[in-house]
Image (cartoon, rainbow, N blue to C red):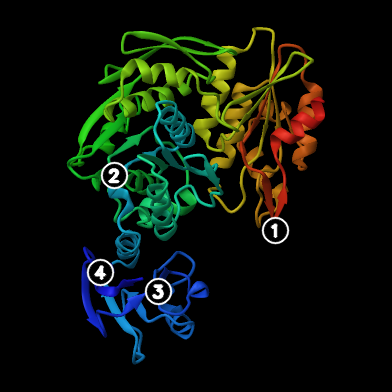
Amino acid sequence: MHTLQALLQGVATQQTIGDHTVWVKSLCFDSRVASQDTLFVAIRGTQVDGHDYIPQAIAAGSRVIVCEQFPPSLVPQVTYVLVAHSAQALGKIAANFYDNPSTKLQLVAVTGTSGKSTTVHLLYGLFKQLGYRVGMLSTIHNKVHEETLPATLTTPDAIQLNSLLAHMVAQGCQYCFMEASSHAMVQERIAGLQLAGAVFLNISHEHLDYHQTFDAYIKAKKKLFDDLPAQAFALYNVDDKRGTVMVQNTKATTYSFAVKSPADYAAKLLSNTWQGLELRIAGKTAWFQLLGAFNAYNLLAAYATAHLLAQDSDEVLVALSSLAPILGRFQVIHTARNFEVIIDYAHKPEALEKALKSIQQIKSKQGKVITVIGCGGNRDQQKRPLMAQIACKLSDQVILTTDNPREEDPQTIIEQMQAGLSPSQQQKTCPIIDRAAAIQVACRLAQRHDVVLIAGRGHEQYQEIKGQKYPFQDEAVVRKFIS
């Protein structure tokens, strides 16, 4: 338990009505989980306004309400705290509640449209190989040293985030590497955390259903670097044309990395095969188990981050070279019929293009590329025709299918993808709504030297259809078929 006075340390409050010394047992921003002696933070969301649920939180036992606007009538024995930005206040309150765990380890945030999960997993595996106890917060799952915990969001909410960090500190973790999504920036989920550094990988068309404009999406990513303290580092990809924009206002010390341009940390791609990547980094040549030219950036970002965290260059390269590919990220399955299946999370235009271009570079000249692709429902509709266009441009055959349709009609989503195709592109596509059937057809069509790319879902283990989650994993469908 903490006193309210202790929890409000560092929070910019405007007015308080009630007792500063009241004890708080727990925090919440959802009135449905409020209980006796809870501090409830009323947050204005895109769908609901937490201020409308203040009475329910009080009825459930909340004795402290943090809000941007006092309710019309105040309840005796309840303390009300007025702030300018509830979500921002929640971040600092949550950090205080868990005794500011981010100050007790080295916390690094990684952001970018694609590559976040791979880079964070590389850093987690790398620092474990170097002998440290490490935590990780990722889209795939969270890790507290050897313990695996489920992940519901790319970046957890402020309460869960600080709880996880506190658990890491209790387990002796010295480092934590986390994915930082654009949604998390806008929603202030990492407010109140102390970062040792942040990494920018890339940015491209994504999440416009939420951010509305690409400029707003860029600003959301940039906020991570704008908020860094002076003692932190800001590592950015100078090959991305918006890399320098990301760090132009940061107080942190900036460092660049690149594969195509001069940079503080540079790599040269020497070889890209089914066996992995050969890179030259810091004057040394090393083989890595990850496939795909785009992974050169993720490997280099991990190397540079480790170097900025004072790790030995040679030891870092040796450790990185031992790490296996990440589940669902350009994951290759070799088949007895001598064609390859690649499962990749690519669900954005740029990521799909990178994956297909890498396949074109690796595959034999006589091999064809067969792509299975869909688009998620209740998400950015502008990218749907783009995804189909990229798939047709870089594939010999394309099967349009279901991803996570959520509340939308899968047939409508597929038709919106087809709308971007020319007549000649239409001829190389085949719509198959059932995803398992689509994967099986692609594998039946594949011949020796061909490559089947199954894109969009990667590690995901369920499909979300009309509010229900059904078990479904691309890899399981492939392995059952080829067995």
Q: Amino acid at mark 3?
A: Phe
Which residue is labeled 3 in the image?
40
Residue 212 visible from this viewpoint: no
Asked whether 122 or 271 is in front, the reply is: 122
157 left or right of 459? left
User: In which image quadrant can residue 455 be found?
Assistant: top right
> In x, y percent, where is residue 238?
30, 26
Q: Looking at the image, which residue is at 60% across and 24% down?
A: 393
Q: Amino acid at mark 4?
A: Ala
Please identify the quadrant where the N terminus is shown. bottom left
> Residues under labels 3 and 1: Cα distance?
31 Å
Give the SS element for disc 2. loop
Of pointers 2 and 1, the one earlier in the residue sequence: 2
Which residue is labeled 1 in the image?
466
How packed mark 2 is, by other alpha carbons closer than 10 Å (few <14, some 14-19, many 20 or more), is many
366 left or right of 41? right
Asked whether 479 or 414 is in front, the reply is: 479
